Image: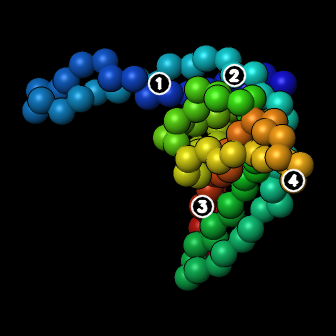
Amino acid sequence: MIVTRLRRQATGVDRYGKPTYTEVASDLDVVGWAPQVSAESNGVEVQTLEYGGTLYLHPRSDVADDDAFLVYGVRYEADGPKALWKHPTGRYPGDVLIVKRKEFSDG
């Protein structure tokens, strides 16, 4: 399965000397995708919907904890660093990365 990795890359500096960035898209071959059921939290006049899932990666995949991903055309942000995907028998099939996105709507 191929997903699109979006990585921030420095492109220069602004007039205040701060770095400017652009997103660079590249294909990333992953082992699989497991979507997560949405979670809702209601506040005063605001409803937050959280969606996410788990990307199952090949061993030593080049993934940073601030990358974003397009999975089936939907943008997700990495929710922390990748972790070892270790089988109970001791086999190491790869890495896992939790991704999520939030949507806000007015009450």
- How busy is the neighbourhood of tag 1: few (under 14 within 10 Å), some, or many (20 plus)? some
Quarter-of-image position of residue 70:
top right
Q: Nearer the viewer, residue 8 or 98?
A: 98
Give the Cα separation between the discs numbered 4 and 3.
39 Å
Give the Cα separation between the discs numbered 2 and 1.
15 Å
Left or right: residue 50 versus residue 91 is left
Please give the residue where the numbered disc 4 appears in the rendered image: 88
**Which mark is in front, 2 or 4?**
4
Please give the residue where the numbered disc 2 appears in the rendered image: 28
Give the Cα separation between the discs numbered 2 and 4.
26 Å
Q: Earlier in the sequence, mark 4 or mark 1?
A: 1
Element at label 4: loop
Question: Where residue 100 sits: x, y (%)?
Answer: 66, 51
Give the Cα separation between the discs numbered 1 and 3.
23 Å
**Which mark is in front, 2 or 1?**
2
Residue drawn at 19 percent across, 23 percent down: 13
- Which amino acid, mark 2? Leu
Element at label 3: strand
Q: Nearer the viewer, residue 36 or 50?
A: 36
Q: Does residue 36 appear in the picture of this structure?
A: yes
Colour style of the rendered protein structure? rainbow
Give the Cα separation between the discs numbered 2 and 3.
29 Å
Please give the residue where the numbered disc 3 appears in the rendered image: 104
**Which mark is in front, 4 or 1?**
4
Question: Where residue 21 sits: x, y (%)?
Answer: 35, 26
Left or right: residue 72 versus residue 4 is right
Work out whether 25 lies above or below 38.
above
- Which amino acid, mark 4? Pro
Q: Earlier in the sequence, mark 1 or mark 3?
A: 1
Q: Nearer the viewer, residue 72 or 66?
A: 66
